[in-house]
Amino acid sequence: MRRPAAAQEGPGSWAREQLGALKELLDKPLTTYYLIIMCSALLLALGLMMVLSASSIEALNKTGSPFSWFIKQSLSAAVGVPVMYLCSRLPVKFFRWAGYPLMALSIIALVMVLFIGSAELGAQRWIYIGPFTVQPSEPAKLGLVLWGADLLSRRVRQGRIEWRQMLIPLMPGTAILAVMVMLGRDLGTTLVLFMIFLSLLWVVGAPVKLFGGIMALAVLAAAIMIKVEPYRMARIGAFLDPWADAQGAGYQAVQGQIAMGSGGWFGLGLGESRQKWNWLPHGESDFIFAILGEELGLMGTLIVVALFGLLGYAGLRVAVRVNDAFTRLAAAAMVAWIVGQATVNMGAVLGVLPITGIPLPLVSYGGSSLLPTLAALGMLLSFAKREPGAREALAARGPGPAARALSWLGLGGTSKGRATR
């Protein structure tokens, strides 16, 4: 008796069929667009959920309401999502122009921090405006991405790709931001700025020797900054052996590891964290990944890692598939910023990197970090529409829910309605 053809082909044929289906999916022009939306939405929703859980006890102790910080984060998200949508609709030339005023405003704000800023935990990063807190170093990351990408794309277009032309004025501009941030004693943000700077040089084709020289200079500067600040030296010691001073410099690292270890495969359950009961410092911000691991377990942390990985893949896919030099540079720099910052944050929680005090993008508490990140992702959506075939696919899809809602309110019309006017 003859077996069916499918059975004769065996599992190898099934695997080839699945790989073919995956390749077909990845070849679609809107794959990047939907990946960015999906990953951003899931990370933002997960972040709001975890901020509510992680901040509830400390918020109750300090404000009398367990929802205080969650409400603030929700308001930031309520502002940030429309900003993301608006940025997704803006043309590339707007982003090329926006980098210059954003860089200037960031430098002015960073100078203001040195004089009127508030110092907490050894770093002077924040400006208090009524009930709100602004951290100027966060929009400075977006400013550097836009300004640096436009600067280098103009150099490439003019045929000036010699390394001295690439570094001037990119390197002095980056150095000004880094010095301002370092004067506020924020080594973590300085590291992120450095990653953005290196990614821009890498994409534009800087020689390897130049990277070696810059890396050596950066390591020397970081070593000096660590040496002159006793709390940074303590952090390095805590990184090497946190359990040697588990009640002192290594306390946060130890409590974070306890939280991660307590979660097991599937976690204690949403809202069931024990470490958030005044054991783990800054569990809603710098160490929210530890609370997530405790409540959602290894599976939850792997999902977060996968979402950031997919977001990075989408950003690099945009950089590879578009033809415009500015778009390519800006997309790659955004991946270095968002995915690089997430890697540093998660690495610090896991104990494989020193604690730097930078938040987990889209997940940690803090509107100053959330708003520029959502704006950057909106810009990435705008770039994704410029992939080959993406505009035609979007046009064939018809108006989206936002456009339909506007037309229902009489504030806009569908593409068909506009065409008949």
Image (cartoon, rainbow, N blue to C red):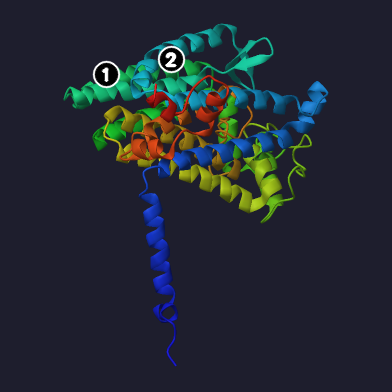
- Left or right for 90, reference 209: right
Quadrant location of the N terminus in the rendered image: bottom left
Q: Assign a secondary structure to mark 1.
A: loop
Determine if residue 187 is in view.
Answer: no
- The x and y percentages for residue 297 are 66, 51
- The x and y percentages for residue 113 are 55, 11
Q: Which mark is residue 168?
A: 1
- Nearer-the-camera pick, 233 or 133: 133
Please report contact status of discs 2 and 1: CB closer than 8 Å, yes or no: no
- Which residue does the image show at 61% across and 21% down from the upper left? 122
Q: Nearer the viewer, mark 2 or mark 1?
A: 2
- Left or right for 45, reference 54: left
- Which residue does the image show at 34% across and 34% down from the upper left? 386
Residue farthest along the left direction in this orientation: 159
Distance of mark 2 from mark 1, alpha carbons? Answer: 19 Å
Q: Which residue is mark 2?
A: 102
Q: Quadrant of residue 10?
A: bottom left
Determine if residue 273 is in view.
Answer: yes
Q: Is residue 140 placed above or below 129 in the rendered structure? A: below
Q: Quadrant of residue 148?
A: top left
Q: Is residue 242 placed above or below 62 in the rendered structure? A: below
- Which residue does the image show at 46% across and 19% down from the upper left? 140
Amino acid type of disc 1?
Ile
- Nearer-the-camera pick, 24 or 79: 24
Query: How many numbered dots are placed on residues in this image?
Result: 2
- Left or right for 131, reference 20: right
- Nearer-the-camera pick, 190 or 265: 265
Local crowd size for mark 2, using a 10 Å CA cut-off: few (<14), some (14–19), many (≥20): some
- Left or right for 22, reference 292: left
Amino acid type of disc 2?
Leu
Q: Assign a secondary structure to mark 2.
A: helix
Quadrant location of the C terminus in the rendered image: top left
